[in-house]
Image (tube, helix red, strand yellow):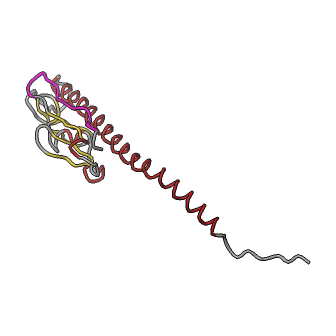
């Protein structure tokens, strides 16, 4: 008569094979996960760049409407003033948003806390992505126009350190 033995678990060889497979998968997946974080920071920076460019153009158009006398309450002048964008007063200089929190940051509706960005004041205004490997190499800059009839300098994203 043949007796059957009940299996109570896995053999040592089965456990070693499973652990080896898990180790190989982890070695392949971890670098891709780290690269995914970097790519997401680059994508965020590109989105902020697009938002800043669009906000500058829209604020300039709103200022030109004020200058043409088409607005009921003109507040934007050639030298400065404010423009109403979605209920927010955006400070202007030479027909474009200023390089500060009440200018381009308000126009682009950037919130440093929720967007995980670091904003360095000054002209040019620097916007960096938090969590970057090298913040100086993961940023965009916005410099307000130096004079009448000139556009702001919005530097393309620097993404080498994201």
Quarter holding the C terminus is top left
Nearer the observer, 38 or 55: 38
Residue 155 falls within the magenta-colored stretch: yes
Quarter residue 50 falls in: top left
Q: Is residue 134 above or below residue 154?
A: below
Q: Residue at x 22, y 30 (%)?
A: 62
Quarter holding the N terminus is bottom right
Single out the residue that lies furthest toward the right.
Answer: 1
Left or right of 123? Residue 132 is: right
Residue 156 falls within the magenta-colored stretch: yes
On the image, the x and y values in percent for residue 3 come to 85, 78
On the image, the x and y values in percent for residue 56 come to 22, 32
Quarter residue 39 falls in: top left
On the image, the x and y values in percent for residue 32 come to 44, 47
Q: Residue at x 15, y 31 (%)?
A: 74
Nearer the observer, 24 or 36: 24
Magenta region, residue range: 146-159
């Amino acid at each position: 008569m043949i007796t059957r033995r009940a299996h109570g678990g896995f053999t040592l060889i089965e456990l070693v094979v499973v652990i080896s497979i898990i180790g190989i998968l982890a070695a392949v997946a971890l670098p891709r996960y780290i690269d995914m974080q970097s790519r997401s920071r680059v994508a965020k920076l590109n989105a902020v760049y697009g938002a800043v460019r669009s906000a500058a153009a829209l604020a300039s158009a709103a200022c030109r409407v004020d200058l043409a006398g088409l607005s009921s309450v003109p507040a934007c002048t050639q030298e400065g003033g404010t423009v109403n964008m979605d209920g927010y007063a955006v400070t202007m200089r030479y027909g474009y948003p200023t390089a500060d929190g009440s200018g381009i940051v308000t126009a682009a509706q950037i919130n440093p806390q929720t967007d995980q960005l670091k904003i360095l004041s000054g002209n040019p205004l620097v916007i960096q992505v938090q969590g970057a490997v090298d913040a100086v190499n993961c940023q965009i800059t916005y410099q307000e126009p130096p004079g009448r009839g000139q556009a702001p300098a919005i530097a393309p994203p620097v993404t080498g350190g994201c």
